[in-house]
């Protein structure tokens, strides 16, 4: 069978088996399309049915999470852990608590994670987990009881050499602390079973900043290829979570100008740009007070608020989507291109729709997929695992230096693979092929398992 037909049949089979899993179809289709040249070049991948195996998770854990609210009323949520691929290391990936969480969304995230983790060059398999529970609007006691109930089931499936979860949307240091504490209590073991822990109990310095910082290091590498840099460039960000805020912080440190960002309520357009005082206000607003960006424009008169809008209408040189999947549509991409955007670097997982990506690539906009550009978070998780194993903590400088090196290596791997297959500048193809190769070769070497 020809490669194209093989890939088409595989994709049709994926859709036939789980017709409702649209997000997973989207992620799988993007990967399968870019792998065509490598399958063509090396017949062993089809011979050993590597891709047929890769699109099936090794294991899916699906469980009930009952918990009591502050009034004593009982609620039930769904819990999941998708252990997608452990060919190159223990399962690794975040836990997401958000009302949008479904089996399909976690399958897409765990699939992406497999490629992302491979790109880091560290021995990390791919996984993702979570629940349709939303910590927003819940009391601290409710969040803690939920995390404990979630861990009452998940603990038996994870372990520092088996599966190491971390944070994601809705799961930050607080939730990880509660889950780690409960795991320790149930198992009577103090081990590095989570990453993103507090620094006083085994967490790595720079882990909270790592994804955002890594995104900017990656963008800088991309711009270097064009003899450019972030310094002096106008940037916009969507999302003011952990990734968005630390992306802004690193842009500022590197001399760029952040003029736009948005949250659930709307977008802020601040022509004068963020400075240290505004960033400090933003961090306190988001991380401590968990408030709305409306407060930012009340405090800083240079800024306008656009209710219900995302940042994409704001003219910029560089755009950083850091919120969630499919947040940047073809229409948004058209607006960005018309306003002269030169680079789009994904801090979130699959935030640009396939049509938006096609437009960027056809218009010569530098585009980096999340699995490459946002791999800094899981990379520092890998460094946290190493520190836990050797029972040492590295300094901020040490971790940041290693992070920068890893982002540079990922960038080089993408560029090299894209060139090898005659698609220079195609970071999507480069990332998919580079991520695939390592996992696929390990799978072949380990036999049919
Ligand atoms: N959830 C993050 C990601 O999407 C981090 C995962 C981790 O540190 O294990 O990569």
Image: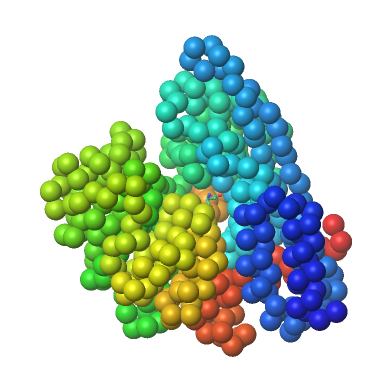
Residue 253 in view in this figure: no
Position above or below: 3 against 97: below
Picture quarter containing residue 311? bottom left
Horizontal side of residue 33 vs 143, given as left or right: right
Residue 330 in view in this figure: yes
Picture quarter containing residue 186? top right
Quick one: which residue is furthest to the bottom in this view? 422
Residue in view at x 58 percent, y 36 percent: 132
Residue in view at x 42 percent, y 59 percent: 321
Residue in view at x 25 percent, y 41 percent: 294
Position above or below: 162 against 235: above
In the rendered image, which quarter contains the C terminus?
bottom right
Point out residue 5 in the picture as x, y percentages from the top left corner: 79, 76
Front residue of this view, candidates 136 and 182: 136
Front residue of this view, candidates 103 and 92: 103
Point out residue 62 in the picture as x, y percentages from the top left corner: 71, 37
Quick one: which residue is furthest to the front in this view? 331
Position above or below: 179 against 51: above
Point out residue 148 in the picture as x, y percentages from the top left corner: 58, 25
In the rendered image, which quarter contains the N terminus?
bottom right
Residue in view at x 76 percent, y 72 percent: 7
Front residue of this view, candidates 414 and 380: 414
Horizontal side of residue 157 vs 48, given as left or right: left
Horizontal side of residue 369 vs 130, given as left or right: left
Count of number-bearing discs: 0
Front residue of this view, candidates 135 and 306: 306
Point out residue 194 in the picture as x, y percentages from the top left corner: 57, 41
Horizontal side of residue 277 vs 5, given as left or right: left
């Amino acid at each position: 069978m020809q490669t194209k037909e093989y890939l088409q049949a595989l994709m049709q089979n994926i859709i036939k088996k789980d017709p409702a899993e649209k997000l997973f179809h989207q992620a799988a289709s993007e990967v399968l399309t870019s792998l065509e040249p490598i399958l063509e070049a090396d017949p062993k991948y089809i011979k050993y049915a590597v891709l047929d195996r890769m699109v099936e998770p090794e294991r899916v854990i699906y469980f009930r999470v009952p918990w009591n609210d502050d009034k004593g009323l009982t609620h039930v949520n769904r819990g999941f852990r998708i252990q997608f691929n452990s060919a190159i290391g223990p399962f690794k990936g975040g836990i997401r608590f958000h009302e949008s969480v479904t089996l399909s969304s976690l399958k897409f995230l765990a699939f992406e994670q497999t490629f992302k983790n491979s790109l880091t060059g560290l021995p990390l398999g791919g996984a993702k987990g979570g629940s349709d529970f939303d910590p927003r609007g819940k009391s601290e006691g409710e969040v803690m009881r939920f995390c404990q109930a979630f861990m009452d089931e998940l603990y038996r499936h994870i372990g520092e050499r088996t599966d190491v979860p971390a944070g994601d949307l809705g799961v930050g240091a607080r939730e990880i602390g509660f889950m780690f504490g409960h795991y320790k209590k149930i198992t009577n073991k103090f081990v590095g079973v989570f990453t993103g822990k507090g620094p006083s109990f085994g967490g790595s310095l720079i882990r909270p900043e790592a994804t955002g910082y890594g995104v900017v290091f990656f963008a800088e590498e991309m711009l270097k290829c064009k003899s450019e840099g972030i310094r002096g460039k106008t940037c916009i960000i969507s999302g003011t979570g952990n990734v968005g805020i630390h992306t802004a912080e690193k842009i500022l440190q590197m001399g760029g100008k952040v003029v736009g960002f948005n949250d659930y309520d709307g977008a802020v357009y601040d022509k004068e740009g963020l400075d240290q005082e505004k960033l400090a206000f933003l961090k306190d607003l988001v991380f401590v007070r968990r408030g709305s960006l409306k407060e930012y424009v009340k405090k800083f008169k240079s800024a306008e608020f656009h209710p219900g809008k995302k940042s994409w209408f704001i003219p910029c040189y560089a755009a950083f989507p850091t919120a969630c999947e499919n947040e940047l549509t073809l229409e948004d991409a058209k607006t960005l291109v018309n306003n002269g955007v030169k680079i789009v670097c994904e801090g979130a997982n699959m935030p640009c729709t396939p049509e938006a990506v096609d437009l960027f690539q056809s218009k010569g906009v530098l585009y980096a997929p999340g699995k490459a550009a946002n791999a800094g978070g899981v990379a520092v998780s890998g460094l946290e695992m190493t520190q836990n194993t050797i029972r040492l903590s590295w300094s901020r400088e040490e971790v940041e230096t290693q992070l920068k090196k890893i982002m540079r290596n990922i960038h080089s791997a993408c560029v090299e693979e894209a060139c090898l297959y005659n698609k220079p500048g195609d970071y999507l193809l480069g990332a998919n092929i580079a991520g695939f190769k390592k996992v696929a070769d390990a799978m072949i070497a380990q036999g049919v398992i």
